[in-house]
Image (cartoon, grey):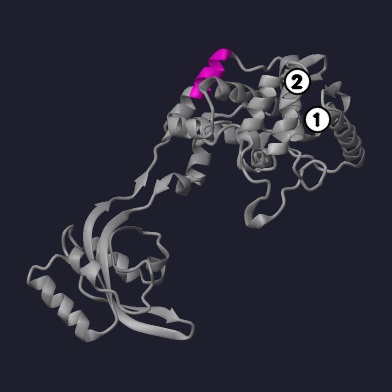
Amino acid sequence: MNKKKVETWRWLLGMALSMAVLLVSAGCGGKNVGRVNDKPISQAEYHKVLERMAVPIVGQNDVPLVDPVTGRIVRDQAGYLALRMLVDRRIVLEMAEKEKVMPTEQEIERELERQKKQPDFNERLKALGYTQDDLKEDIKVELAAFKLITKGITVTEEEIRKEYNRRIQQFTIPAQVQVALILVDNRKKLDEIQSQIKKGVDFLVLAGQYRPPDMPPTMNTTSVWLQENNEMFRQLPQLWQTLQKTPVGSVTPPQPIRWQSAPGKVVNGWILFKVLEKKERQVRPLDDEVREDLRRLLMQMKSKRDLGRELVQMRTQAKVTFEIPRYNRRWEQDVQQWKQIAQTGTPAPTPAMPTPSTGGGSP
C-alpha cells in the first residue's frame, strides 16, 4: 500500500504489550479467545499478534497514539487491540473471498520473493520475531486489501513510463565523494599543516590530530561520504566543483569557509579535503521491480474505493464475541462509535494489515 493509505494503520504496530495484559490473556480458559462470524480466533493466533506489539504505546515526542477510527487515545488495551486487528484481518479476507479476489498461493509466494530481495531481509525478520510463514499470512491480507481496492483497475506500460520519468529523482542516487577533511581556524596553523602534507605526513593522521576550539562536531574526520546535494554544496557550489576536479588521492587547495562556533560568534577559516573515492551519479533503470512498484502505485492512485468506510460498516455487521467480558463491552462501545461514523459521513482510514518492515515490497 502507498504510505498515505497505510499510515493510519501502522499505529497498530506501536501498541505496548504490558505484563498485565499478558497475564490476562494467558488466563483465558479455552483454546479460542473469540469468534468472528462463527469462525474462531485461536489463542495461538492471538498470542502471536500480542508478541509483535512490543513498541511503547506513545508515539514520537511522547505523544499518545490515537485510534484513527474512534478518535480516542489508545491506552494499555493491547490485548483488545490485538483482537480487533485479528477481526479486521478476518473481515478483509472474507470480503476478498466473496468478491473472488482472494490472493493465490502463487501470488503470495511471488510477493514473498520480492521482499526477500530487500537488504538484510532475514535479519529484520528475525528481529521482529517473524517466520516466513508468519510473513506469508500478513502478505495474504495485504494483497487481499490491495486487490479489493484496485479491483477492475488496469495500468498501461505508457502510464508506468510517464510516472517513472515524473519521479526520476526518486530513482536517482546522487554523485558522491568520500573525503577526509581538516578544518583550520588560523593562517599560521594552515601553513603548518600544508607544510607537513608536503613533507609526506599522512593527511589522515593530521585530520585526527588537529581540532580547533569550538569547531563543528562533524568536522575533521578521516572518512565521510559527501553527496552532491549536500546542504554545504548548495551554499558553496564551488566546493563541489573543486572536489570533482581533484583526483582520487590528492588534497584540494585550502577553501575559505565560515562556521558558527557559538551564538553570535562566526569564525572565518579554511577547509582542506583529501579525496579518497568517487562515485558517479546513478539512475536506477525501469527494471521489473521498479515497474511493479509503479504499477501498484498507479492502481492505488486510480482507485476511488473507500475500503476504510466499508470496513467500518462490516465491523458493525459482523458477529463478534470474545472470551474476555470487558473486551466484549469495549467492542459494543466501538460498534456504536462506528455506526455514528457511518451515519455522519466522517472519513475512515483505509485498512492495511501490518507486515514487518523488511524494506518495502509489499503492496
Residue at the (87%, 41%) spot, across then down: 345
* Identity, as a three-letter code, of the amino acid under mark 2: Met
Q: Secondary structure at mark 2?
A: helix
Side of 350 where 204 appears, left or right:
left
- The overriding secondary structure of the stretch rendered in magenta is helix
Q: Residues within 10 Å of mark 1 (few under 14, many from 20)?
A: some
**Would you place residue 61 above or below residue 334 in this image?**
below
The reply to whether the C-beta atoms of the residues labelled 2 and 1 are less than 8 Å apart is yes
Name the mark on residue 13.
none
Residue at the (76%, 43%) spot, across then down: 68
Q: Which residues are magenta?
A: 105-112
Residue at the (47%, 23%) spot, across then down: 113
Q: Position of residue 128 (x, y in %)?
A: 53, 34
Q: Secondary structure at mark 1?
A: helix
Residue ID for mark 1 = 310
| Whether residue 77 is visible | yes
**Would you place residue 247 above or below residue 42 in this image?**
below
Name the mark on residue 95.
2
| Mark toward the start of the polypeptide (2 vs 1) | 2
Locate residue 253: give its quadrant: bottom left
Q: Position of residue 13 (x, y in %)?
A: 64, 38
